[in-house]
Image: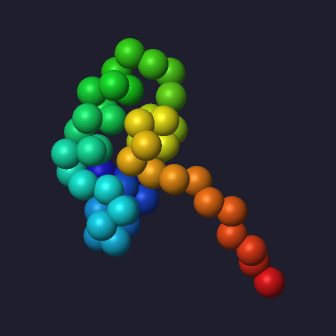
């Protein structure tokens, strides 16, 4: 599993079940797992201010 997915699981931002659901949906589309997680509403894109 990619490091970013491991980090998302560790921080409890997504569950294993959500990742598995996204992988199932990803099979038919040309999108990254992260894009599918966002599309499905499991992840939210936020803007961060960096000083």
Is 7 located above or below residue 19 in the figure? below
Residue 50 % position (x, y): 75, 78
Q: Residue furthest top?
A: 28
**Residue 6 visible in this rendered orientation of the protein:** no
Q: Identify the residue at image location x=33%, y=35%.
A: 22
Q: Nearer the viewer, residue 1 or 13?
A: 13
Image quadrant of residue 47? bottom right
Q: Residue furthest left?
A: 17
Residue 17 % position (x, y): 19, 45
Residue 43 % position (x, y): 45, 51
Q: Identify the residue at image location x=50%, y=28%.
A: 31
Q: How is the image coloured?
A: rainbow
As drawn, is 49 to the left or to the right of 18? right
- Give the quadrant of the C terminus: bottom right
**Residue 42 visible in this rendered orientation of the protein:** yes
Image quadrant of residue 5? bottom left
Residue 7 % position (x, y): 37, 66
Q: Residue furthest front?
A: 41
Q: Residue furthest bottom?
A: 51
Q: Identify the residue at image location x=30%, y=67%.
A: 12
Q: Nearer the viewer, residue 12 or 33?
A: 12
Q: Identify the residue at image location x=27%, y=27%.
A: 24
How many marks are shown on the rendered structure? Answer: 0
As drawn, is 2 to the left or to the right of 24? right
Is 46 located above or below residue 30 in the figure? below
As drawn, is 2 to the left or to the right of 50? left
């Amino acid at each position: 599993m990619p490091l970013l997915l491991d980090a998302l699981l560790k921080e409890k931002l997504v569950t294993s079940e959500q990742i598995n659901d996204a992988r199932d949906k990803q099979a038919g589309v040309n999108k990254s797992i992260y894009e599918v997680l966002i599309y499905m509403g499991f992840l939210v894109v936020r803007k961060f201010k960096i000083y």
